[in-house]
Amino acid sequence: MADKELHRGLDGIAVAETRLSGIDGAAGELVIGGFPVEELAGNASYEESVFLLFDDRLPTEPELESFRAELAGYREIPEEVEQVLRRAAREDRDAMDALRMGVAAADLGLDATDPTEVATRLVSVLPTIVATYWRCRSGREPVRPRADLGHAANYLWMLTGDEPDPAAVRGLETYLNTVVDHGLNASTFVARSVVSTESDLVSAVTGAVGSLKGPLHGGAPGPVLEMLLAVHETGDAEGYVRETLASGERLMGFGHRVYRTRDPRAAVLSRAAERFYADSDERAFFETVEAFEEVAVALLSEHKPDRALETNVEFYTAALLHGVGIPRELFTATFAVSRVGGWTAHCLEQRADNKLIRPVSVYVGDRDRSWKPANER
Ligand code: ACO
């Protein structure tokens, strides 16, 4: 039918109003809860970012204390969820599969009358699910959450069982704030679509986890790190990029649906990584990362002169998360640990002024087939 205009991938189509975050893809600007990402990321704690998204303002000191305590109070996961995660680890399931199973199994008070409480519980429990899976996956016992630690520090604690290093906590916290929300990206769209049917937030976050897993969305930083480690060993960034592009593959960590400039989050994370690596033994690795970016952007512009393919958030995510000690198998799951703040805030926003999300499709199939019984086909 030619009566509907086709927008493949909903490219450029606005389907919701939001006060949570805004992107100017041409200028390369991102605002989160009214703050330029550069202003928020390095200053806020993750708890402050989530409060900002839920309440559209920063908390006062007592409000922050009480929100921290509330989040810390929901960190434990029930025994049944731990069993699901132990099984996922035994069966060598990917971290995002384990996260999906863990979220789906975690009955977080689906029928709670206060959706903000369910949202808060989801934000609180995702790090415990990821860390429990990871401890089992690496043959160790889970480490119980500690209520005296902030959200980012407790995540590192549950992963390692070691007292978290303040520089690593700051690096991770900057990362969590930087990626907490980003307009109507694929996983956030999924979350909003689910609650637009008046379904619940746990279902929405379960669906969003599935959407984030793919390499065109949140699945890129693991491969980015492998690429960077390989190039750090050979020293041949140009050869790597040329070979990748010649074989028709995409260079992970570059290109974006909305930005036609360097992703502003890449700038924030590159500065955070630079600070982190300055005092680390792996300074030389960070030099490789920066040199690789320069070569890659130059060769991508030769490869696709008509399409600005610049560095996206995943490139420096890989460098920063590697530095702060997150295993590469958990990069995408750690993205979810942050983005659940945005997903749930969008769910609350959608619920507050709901309109069922229901796009249309253009039918291009046959119209005049006539039925034949199976034995006559
Ligand atoms: N390397 C090489 N070529 C690329 C890249 C890349 N990273 N990105 C896009 N292109 C090419 C495509 O092959 C395509 O070429 P064609 O027109 O000859 O077919 C052209 O540029 C346009 O690409 P599209 O896929 O139409 O662009 P879209 O806006 O849909 O894709 C995306 C954006 C998915 C991020 C893409 O740039 C990509 O695949 N990048 C690599 C994966 C990645 O880094 N993902 C993380 C994204 S950030 C995030 O989600 C948090």
Image (tube, rainbow, N blue to C red):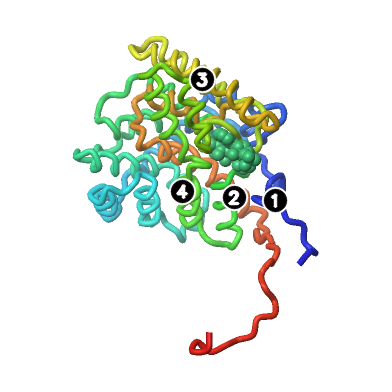
**Local SS, label 2:** helix
**Badge 4 vs badge 3, beta-carbon distance below 8 Å:** no
Q: Is residue 260 left or right of residue 136?
A: right
CA gap, disc 2 to disc 3?
Answer: 27 Å
Tag 4: amino acid: Val
Residue 325 location in percent, x, y?
A: 34, 26
Identify the residue position indicated by label 2 in the image: 189
First along the sequence among labels 1 and 2: 1
Identify the residue position indicated by label 1 in the image: 15
| Front one among 357 and 62 | 357
Picture disc at residue 209:
4
Q: Is residue 271 left or right of residue 281?
A: right
| Front one among 73 and 329 | 329
Residue 348 location in percent, x, y?
A: 58, 50
**Local SS, label 3:** helix
- Callout 3 environment at 10 Å: few (<14), some (14 to 19), or many (20+)? many
The answer to whether 376 is drawn above or below residue 39 in the figure is below
- Callout 4 environment at 10 Å: few (<14), some (14 to 19), or many (20+)? many
CA gap, disc 2 to disc 4?
Answer: 12 Å
CA gap, disc 1 to disc 2?
Answer: 9 Å
Tag 3: amino acid: Ser
CA gap, disc 4 to disc 1?
Answer: 21 Å
First along the sequence among labels 2 and 3: 2
Query: Residue at 66% of width from left, 61% of height from top?
Result: 358
First along the sequence among labels 2 and 4: 2
The answer to whether 234 is drawn above or below residue 254 in the figure is above
Q: Is residue 24 left or right of residue 196?
A: right
Tag 2: amino acid: Phe
Identify the residue position indicated by label 3 in the image: 270
